[in-house]
Structure formats: C-alpha cells, structure tokens
Amino acid sequence: MTHRRTLALLATFALAIVAACGGDSDEPSGAPTTEDRAAPAFSSVTVDGPLDVTVRLKRGAPERIEVTAPGGGHERIVTSVESGAATVTADSEPLEGTSVLLVVATLEAIDATEGASVSLVGEVELPVFEAAATAGASIVARDVIGFERTSGSWQLRVEGDSTIDLAEILASSVNVEASGRSTVTVEALISVTGTVEPGATLEVLGSPNRVDVTGGGFVRAEPAEPITPPTDPAPERPDALTGAPLPALETESVAFDEDRFNPSAGTFPALTDPAVVPAEDARWLDDDTLVLGATQNGEARAYPIFMLTFHHVANDTLGGEPYLVTF
C-alpha cells in the first residue's frame, strides 16, 4: 500500500467518526423561528423555570401563545391551558434565544418561580390582581400604554432572591408579603399594607394615604402631602361654553373607608358624593392628565379618567341637582 493510499484511508476513517459523532448530537441549531400555539381563553399565568416570558395585555385580543426558539428548540417549551390558567414550563434547559409571548385580554394572576423572568406590557389594567415571585424569579411591568396604567387592589407575594417591580402601573391599594432577600416596588394611590421581613425591601411610590407595613424589613415610602384648602377665595373662572363666571368649588373632607375601594365582591366600588378641590390645588394631577368634564346649572367639575377607570361610576351633585358620571 502506497503512502498516498494510506493517508486517503485515514482521512476517510476520520470523516466517518466526525459524521457519527455529529449524528448523536441533540442540540438544535439554526436561526430562531416562532411557533404560534392557539390557546383557549385564560386569565392567569404560571411560569416555572428559567424562561424569558412576555405577557402582553390587549383589550379584545384572542388569547394566544407564541414560542420563539432555534430550530427544534420549541419542543423544550411545554405550554398548556386548563380552567382558565396558562402554564409555561421548560421540559429541558432552554436554548439561548428562546422566548415566550402570551397575549391575553384580561389578567388576574401571575405566578413565577425557578428563575423565570416575566415582563408585563401593553394595555395594562388590573382591577383585581395577584402576583407571586419565588426562587429567583422576577415580574416587571414595562412599556405600559396610556391611562390604562391605573388599576385596583393587588395581593403581592415575593420570596427568596426574587423581584416584583410594578411601578409603571398605579394601584389603588396593595398588600405585600415579602421575605428572604426579595425586593418589591409599587406605586399606590390609597394604601399599602402587609409584612416585609428582615432582609427584604419594599419601595412605595405615589405618596398613598396610608402605609402600614410590619415585619422589620426595609421600607422606603414617599410621604403623602396633605391637601390644604386655600384661605383666599379662588379667582372666578369663565364657563367654557357661555363665558359666564363660575362659582369657586368648595373643598370637603371625608373619612377614608378602605372597604369602598375593595372590588373583590364582584361590583365596581362606585364613588358617592366625592370630595372636590379647586383645580389649582389638585397637585397630584399633571397638565396632560385626562379628565371627564361636566357642567350643569353654571357649575363645572372634572373627574380624572384614571379614577373613573377603577370606580367606573360616580354619584355626585352638580349645580344643585343629582348627577351620574360613568366611564
């Protein structure tokens, strides 16, 4: 056998070994592709495992699940929907570049664990909402759209080295249970209550009326600014329709009743005879805050949309006569 013939046989043998080894590999390859998985309606989401999941809220949209992964990697992501609850798990270690998108019209609960990373985006409105992040998981609100960012009563539970950050959404009231080295960030309008154990951190934005948190953990909260009625009468303001001067709006104090702001009974917590302040004293409103305006018998009033989005109904008296506002 010649020297050249020996080298050729060795090269062929080496190629056969490489081919055989390559055939045993179960690592999918190729550019990521998206697999659309139709799903029945669901309003709660559970994510178990180190997955990158986005939950997009879109009013009126049909529920669906999209899995993006390199070729063949879709099989590693198991999704199911049962009794209105969607579950996303990893059957084996997800490939790099794998992500999951869930589109839902209404969201009531998220449970993330085992390193899951959940982003909440879109037209977010959460009248009643529960969230739990455990075992290194995170739930974060991002890219929330418009005045839909205002929501209702929440229950949040976070354990271990986990994170819940919903500061982009304004809640009415929040109850927090935090332990381990967890962190929670929320913005609330009315109250924040609960227990934050040593080692855990709670940051409260929005200057709610009441912050009542026990447990010995670290709590950072912005103090509520008291509303002081002006001592001088407000200047006359012309009616937007007739140009005639309007009387100054009088201020009124009402006792806080948290039960009125709890929609868990299945009905909207309507506002009845809401307290009012002159426009210049409404320091919690921005110049671009949307309001619903009403005039009757020479009296005008503005109802912030973000409050009506939660209460939906206001029973008021305007211009000396009963007045119903709904949104």
Image: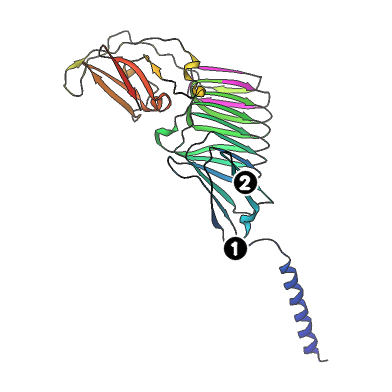
Residue 11 bears which disc, if any?
none
Q: Is residue 221 left or right of residue 318?
A: right
Marks 2 and 1 sit apart, C-alpha to C-alpha, by 20 Å
Residue in view at x 32 percent, y 7 percent: 231
- Indicate yes or no whether the magenta region holds residue 202: yes
Q: Which residue is mark 1?
A: 30
Query: Quarter of the image holding residue 61?
Result: top left
Residue in view at x 78 percent, y 89 percent: 5
In this rendering, is residue 44 above or below 32? Answer: above
Q: Residues within 10 Å of mark 1 (few under 14, many from 20)?
A: few
Query: Regarding mark 2 in the picture, which secondary structure is present there?
Result: loop
Q: Amino acid at mark 2?
A: Leu
Quadrant of the drawing holding the N terminus: bottom right
Q: Is residue 202 left or right of residue 23?
A: left
Report the front residue among 34 and 1. 34
**In this view, which residue lies farthest toward the right?**
1
Q: Residues within 10 Å of mark 2 (few under 14, many from 20)?
A: many
Q: Amino acid at mark 1?
A: Gly
- On the question of residue 48 being in view, the answer is yes
Report the front residue among 236 and 102. 102
Quadrant of the drawing holding the C terminus: top left
Query: Regarding mark 1 in the picture, which secondary structure is present there?
Result: loop
Q: Are marks 2 and 1 in contact (CB under 8 Å)?
A: no
Q: Position of residue 267 (x, y in %)?
A: 46, 23
- Span shown in magenta: 193-213
